[in-house]
Image: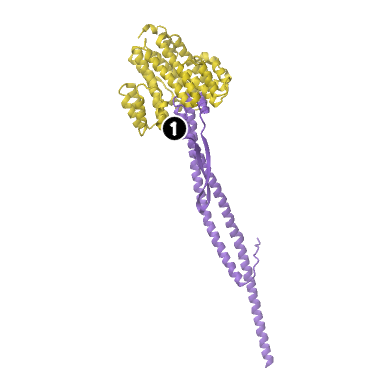
């Protein structure tokens, strides 16, 4: 694959500048590589966390369903339905914010908001509501919290993947485009400079020969 | 004790007692398909109610309706064959179902439920028959309309007062609790009117039910970390464990010390209380549902204890024990049916069943 070279004046100063740019590009590529490695480690950690949270979330949901079934078995499905439908719903919301994560990246942060007055009274009639239903309500809140945490982790993972992809593109651009371009330009400038040197050497020899000839004629 | 009062009711209770399903038969229904349960119950006292059930509607809701109808019918039979103060007590106990229907009507109106859907949970009893409930729901658009209709049709002044208050407060939970309170007050008043051993037995059996209800309430209160300020409103009329003790118990740091406070007050007075509190203290770390299950069995334990202590016949003990056994059977069947429909494991279902042999 042919590499385009940069349009530069083939001078020694440019050659030094090009060599400096190449060293800088290699340095940047190394730093980016280290960032990429750190990001991949963070991604693996978040993925493991997400897996744990997902397992916890499924466990909470499983327990909730089991408790709900138990509530239906204890009080009857009709009563549970009736109580559930007539109870005032809790107004939940999600607050979206941002936190600074690895390499100063802004990660999304989600917070479950429960808009409810202070717990001054029970939500259900304590006399004819099985405790399992209260426990289900508490577990559901726990499940919602886990769900929000899981969503936050998924958003962070998505963000990390985006940044990793960007860093990888940057590294690839430096390694496979900028550095080869600089190499090609350096080679080109070196060739030109060598050519100029050779021409100069010939010119010097010609001048020396002419000077000798003029000296011989003068004698 | 007036043996004459029991001339008619005792044979009736004995007949109904013989109709109770054997625990082994109930256990054998666990994990079975609803159609199998239906066939098994077809040869039981539930036959009459089951015959009204169409094959298309053979779901757990329909089975629940059938079982509850049978329970209420059995209670009504006992009321029919009883007289005097025993009749008044049975009517007071039956009032629980009437109030449960009021709960259903209020909840249906609050949730704006479909009339047919709401009617599924109505157990026709007393004045609140199916037609009356349907008419109330159909003719009402708001909770106030339902409340007004109920106030018009209700004879009980205490219930009327609670419903009138509901129109002002609009707090459904508090109204439901207040309605339950009137029922338990009625039961205690009816028990108070009995004489001799009957009075003692009725107060013990029904009293422990109320105490267990209060205990469940404060346990829930504690676990849900609700402010204690308004707890008094949610407590039923107290019997052996007074309100002061209950309130003192709520200040305890954990469930174990709370139960210990109650134990010191009640256990010395009655051995059934002692047995129940000892079990709760032993299992204080168990989930609240387990403690609730122990408390739910308190009334049945007490009634069986009363039968042991007093003669089986010619006292209210046998009647109340039968009612508790029948209620336990209803709960067991309901549990099995719902468990079957929701494919719950046999061990989970078995844990929730109550048999006299487990007590």
Q: Nearer the viewer, residue A203 or B215?
A: B215
Judge left or right: residue B50 versus residue A2: left
Residue A23 appears in the figure: yes
Q: Position of residue B20 (x, y in %)?
A: 44, 15
> Which chain is displayed in yellow in the rendered image?
B
Residue B346 appears in the figure: no
- Residue at the spot of label 1: A120
Q: Nearer the viewer, residue B156 or A127?
A: B156
Q: Is residue A82 above or below residue A34?
A: above
| Figure quadrant of residue B322 | top left
> Which chain is displayed in purple in the rendered image?
A
Judge left or right: residue B246 versus residue A76: left
Q: Position of residue A205 (x, y in %)?
A: 65, 82
Which quadrant, please, contains the N terminus of chain B? top left
Q: Quick one: SS at disc 1?
A: loop
Which quadrant, please, contains the C terminus of chain B? top left
Number of numbered tags placed on the structure image: 1
Q: Position of residue B260 (x, y in %)?
A: 33, 29
Residue for point 39% across, 7% down? B5
Badge 1 density bin: few <14, some 14–19, many ≥20, Cα 10 Å: few
Q: Position of residue B130 (x, y in %)?
A: 54, 16
**Visual colour scheme:** by chain
């Amino acid at each position: 694959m042919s590499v385009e070279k940069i349009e530069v004046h083939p001078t020694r100063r440019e050659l030094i500048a090009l060599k400096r740019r190449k060293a800088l590009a290699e340095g940047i590529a190394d730093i980016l590589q280290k960032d990429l490695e750190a990001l991949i480690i963070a991604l693996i950690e978040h993925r493991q966390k997400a897996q744990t949270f997902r397992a916890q979330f499924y466990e909470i949901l499983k327990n909730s369903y089991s408790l709900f079934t138990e509530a239906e078995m204890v009080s009857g499905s009709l009563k549970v339905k009736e109580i559930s439908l007539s109870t005032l719903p809790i107004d939940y919301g999600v607050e979206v914010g941002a936190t600074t994560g690895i390499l100063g990246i802004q990660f999304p942060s989600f917070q479950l908001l429960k808009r409810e007055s202070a717990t001054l009274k029970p939500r259900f009639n304590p006399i004819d509501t099985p405790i399992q239903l209260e426990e289900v309500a508490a577990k559901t809140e726990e499940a919602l919290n886990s769900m929000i945490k899981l969503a936050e982790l998924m958003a962070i993972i998505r963000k990390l993947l985006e940044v990793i992809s960007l860093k990888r593109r940057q590294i690839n651009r430096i390694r496979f485009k900028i550095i080869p371009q600089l190499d090609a330009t350096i080679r080109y400038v070196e060739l030109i400079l060598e050519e100029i040197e050779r021409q100069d050497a010939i010119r010097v020899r010609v001048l020396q020969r002419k000077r000798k000839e003029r000296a011989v004629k003068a004698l | 004790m007036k043996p004459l009062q029991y001339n008619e009711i005792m044979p009736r209770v004995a007949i109904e007692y013989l109709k109770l399903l054997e625990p082994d038969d109930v256990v054998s229904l666990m994990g079975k398909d609803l159609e199998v349960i239906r066939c098994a119950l077809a040869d039981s006292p539930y036959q009459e109610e089951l015959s009204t059930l169409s094959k298309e509607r053979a779901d757990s809701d329909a089975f629940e309706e059938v079982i509850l109808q049978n329970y209420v019918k059995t209670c009504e039979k006992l009321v029919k064959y009883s007289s005097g103060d025993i009749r008044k007590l049975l009517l007071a106990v039956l009032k629980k179902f009437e109030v449960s229907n009021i709960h259903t009507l209020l909840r249906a109106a609050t949730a704006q439920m479909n009339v047919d859907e709401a009617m599924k949970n109505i157990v026709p009893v007393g004045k609140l028959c199916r037609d009356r409930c349907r008419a109330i729901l159909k003719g009402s658009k708001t909770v106030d309309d339902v409340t007004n209709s109920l106030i018009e049709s209700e004879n009980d002044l205490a219930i009327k007062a609670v419903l009138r208050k509901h129109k002002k407060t609009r707090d459904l939970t508090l109204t439901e609790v207040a309605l339950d309170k009137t029922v338990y007050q009625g039961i205690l008043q009816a028990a108070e009117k009995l004489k001799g051993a009957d009075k003692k037995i009725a107060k013990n059996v029904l009293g422990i039910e109320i105490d267990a209800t209060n205990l469940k309430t404060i346990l829930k209160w504690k676990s849900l970390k609700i402010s204690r300020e308004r707890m008094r409103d949610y407590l039923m009329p107290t019997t052996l464990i007074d309100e002061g003790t209950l309130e003192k118990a709520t200040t305890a740091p954990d469930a174990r010390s709370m139960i210990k406070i109650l134990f010191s007050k009640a256990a010395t007075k009655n051995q059934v209380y002692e047995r129940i509190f000892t079990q709760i203290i032993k299992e204080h770390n168990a989930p609240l549902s387990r403690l609730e299950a122990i408390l739910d069995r308190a009334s049945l334990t007490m009634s069986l204890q009363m039968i042991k202590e007093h003669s089986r016949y010619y006292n209210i003990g046998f009647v109340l024990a039968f009612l508790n056994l029948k209620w336990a059977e209803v709960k067991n069947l309901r549990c099995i049916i719902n468990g079957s429909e929701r494919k719950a494991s046999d061990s989970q279902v078995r844990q929730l069943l109550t048999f006299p042999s487990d007590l």
